[in-house]
Amino acid sequence: MVKKCITEERTLMLHFFTDPYKDELIYSAISRYHYYTGNIDFKDTLEELFDKRNIIPSLEIGSNIEVLAENIGGKYTADCLINNHTIYPFYSPFLPKKRHKQILKEIKFQDGKGLYAKIGIIAGSICSKKHIYYCPLCAKENIEKYGEAYIHREHQLQGVLLCHKHEIELKKYPISKMDVSRLEYIRVDAKSLDLKDFRIDKSKYQDKLLKIAKDAYYLLNQDFNNISKEKIAENYKNLLYERGLTTSSGRVKQRELYEEFINFYGKEFLELMESSIDIEDEFNWLKVATRDEERTVHPIRHLLLINFLRDDISKFFKYINYQYNPFGKAPWPCLNRVADHYKKKVVRTLNITQDYKTRVPVGTFICSCGFVYSRKGPDKTEQDKYKIGRIKSFGFTWENKLKSLLSIRKYGVREISRIMSCDTKTVIKYANRLGLISSINTEFKVCEVEQKSRELVTTVENKYKNDVINFINSNEGCTRQQLRNNLKKEYIWLYRHDKPWLKNNLPESIPRGKRNKSENNRVDWEKRDNEYLKLIKEKNEIMLRLAVPVRITKSSIGKSTGLLAVLEKTINKLPNTEKYLSEIIESVEEFQIRRCKNIINYKIDKGESIRIWEIQRIAGIRSEAFGRIKFMILEYIDSQNKGDIWVKKQ
Ligand SMILES: [Zn+2]
Ligand SMILES: [Zn+2]
C-alpha cells in the first residue's frame, strides 16, 4: 500500500529534517521541525524549508511542495509527499481528469492560493472542521512508540468523525488556527491532549460512521493516478444498470435511485452527513454525482454512493475498468444450426433492450449469416450463452439451405424440419414464401394439415357445446330465443356442424303465443339474484387467492362463473348482484396495487427486505403507471412496518 518514496540520495541542504510519520501531514512535520531547530521566528523556519519568508501554513495540503522536497535533500519526491502526507488523495479520484495536472502543479510550485476552491474543499465543503482533530488512542500509541504525538491526515478529513483504527470518536485539539499567529504551525503537544477520558461512541450510526472512516482511509492509501471523475461516473452507470436503476439506453432513473438511497441510509443519517437530497432539485448532489458533469461532489458523498452500490470499496476500484454486460463479452455464439459456424463465437452485434413487463435485459444477437435470435438475460452460466429465447430471423443462409433441400424434392416436411431445426409449420410457411410448397413430399404435407384442422375443429366444437350447456344451466328456464341472442356465434356454428346435437340439447320450444306470459311466470328474479350473488362471492374469493393474479372485471368474473351473458344482458333485474359486482370490480390501478401488496406481503412473510424498484419489477408495472400508485404502496409499506394487524390479515 505504501508507495515508494525514496529517490536517490542527494546532498542534504538542511542539516536535518524530521521524517514524517505514517499518515502525518506535512504541516505537522514542519511544526516539529520548527520545534527541534529551536527557531524562534516561524519566518526563519519558512525560509529554511521554502526559501520564502511568507508562506501561509495550510493544514491539509500545503504548497510549494517541490521546493520543500528539494530543500529536505531529495529524500522525498514532491509526489510522494503529496500522496502520503496530504489529504489530496481523498479528493483526487473525484476530480475531472483535466484538472488533475493543473492542481498538482499548483501544489508543487505555487503558493496554494485558490487551491482549496479548485479541489472543492471550500465550495463543496460539508462537515467542515475548524479544529485539529486527534484520536486519543492513536496519540497514546504514537507517544509510546516515538515519544511524541503528531497530526494524522485521516483524522482531519471532513465527514470523518471516528478513528478508523480504534473505532472511537475523534477529539478536538484545544488550540486552533484562530488562536495563533498567521504564520504559526501548531504543534500537537502531548500535554494538551486528553488521552485518558475517551469514550467508545454508542451512536446508532456507529457502523455507518466507521464505514466512512475506513473507506476514507482506504482512499488516502491508494495510488489512483489514472482514476478521475469520468471513470468513476462511468462505473456508477454500470453498477446502476446492474441494479436496474438505469434504462437500457443508460439514463439514470433518478427517482428510483433516490428512493432506494433514502431507504438505505435514512434521511436522518444523511442530514448528519450534511448530504440531504432534495429530489426536486435538478442539481442535488446525487443527480450531479451520477451524471457526467463538470461540477464536483464531495468525497464523503461519493463514499456514500459507492457504499450503496457496492459494499466493498476495494471491489469498486478493482473492477472500475470492468464494463458490465448482462450477456458477457463479445463475441457470442451463432445458433444457426445450418450455418458452418454453428455454436462458434462469431457474433459481434448485440442490441440490449428491456423486457416490457419484467424489465429484465433482452439481448438480440445479430449474426453476419443473417440469423437473428434473442434471449432474456442476464446470462448466469456459460450454458446460457447457447440458449435461444426467440428466433427473430432465420436469414439468407438458412433460407438458401431450405431452398436446396426443397429442390431435391425428396424429403417430407418432418425430415426437413429436423434438418433445419425448426417446426413443421415454419417449413411450410417458408416453403410457401419461397414458392416451393409443391416440392414438399405431399403425403406428409396433407396429413399434417388435415390433422391440424381436425384438432382445431374438435376444440372449437367442445368449447361451443360447453358454452351452450353452461348458458342453459345457469339460465334455468331460458328460451331458445334467449340462447340464440346470447350465443349467436356458437348457435350458428353448431347449427351448421352438429344440428342433431343442438336439437337434443336446446330448451323446449315454446309456442309463440305463450312466450311472454310463461317467461314472466317462470322466472323468480329475486331468488336468482341471490343465487348469482352467492356464486360470484365464492368465485371472487377464489380469484383473489390465485397464484397468478387475475384482474377482477365483469368479464373475468362472468367467464369463470359461466354467467357472462347474464351479467351483460339481465343485470338490471339483479340489484344485489349488480351492487356487489360494482364493489369488487377493479380498475387497472386497483389491480396494480393489489399485485404490489401481494408481493409485499409475501416478502414480509419470508422476512425479505423490501425494495420499491423490485416490487415494481416483479409486479411488472411501467414506471409512469407506477409513479401514480407509488405513494399508496409506500404508505402500505409504512403501515406494515409498524406491525399493523390489518397487514397480517391481508
Ligand atoms: Zn486511533
Ligand atoms: Zn451465423
Image (spheres, helix red, strand yellow):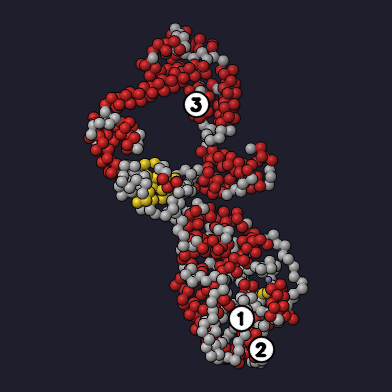
**234 sits to left or right of 646:** left
CA gap between label 1 and label 3 equals: 83 Å
Amino acid identity at mark 3: Lys
Given this view, does label 1 or label 3 mark the residue nearer the observer? 1
Q: Which residue is mark 1?
A: 20
How far from the left and from the top, in percent, is residue 505? 45, 12
Q: Would you say residue 165 is visible in this rendering?
A: yes
Q: Which residue is mark 2?
A: 36
The residue under the point 72% across, 75% down is 140
Q: Report crowding for label 3: few under 14, some 14 to 19, many 20 or more residues within 10 A (C-alpha).
A: some
Q: Quadrant of the C terminus?
A: top right
How far from the left and from the top, in percent, is residue 274? 61, 65
Q: Quadrant of ligand 1?
A: bottom right
| Relative height, residue 282 to residue 509 (above, below) | below
Given this view, does label 2 or label 3 mark the residue nearer the observer? 2
Amino acid identity at mark 1: Pro
Task: Answer with mark 2 or mark 3, whichever residue precedes in sequence.
Answer: 2
- CB contact under 8 Å: marks 1 and 3: no
The residue under the point 39% across, 17% down is 494
Disc 1 under 8 Å from ligand 1? The reply is no
Q: Which mark is residue 559?
A: 3
Q: Report crowding for label 1: few under 14, some 14 to 19, many 20 or more residues within 10 A (C-alpha).
A: some
The part of the image, by quadrant, that contains residue 304 is bottom right
| Relative height, residue 413 to residue 590 (above, below) | above
Q: Which mark is residue 132?
A: none
Q: Nearer the viewer, residue 512 or 228?
A: 228
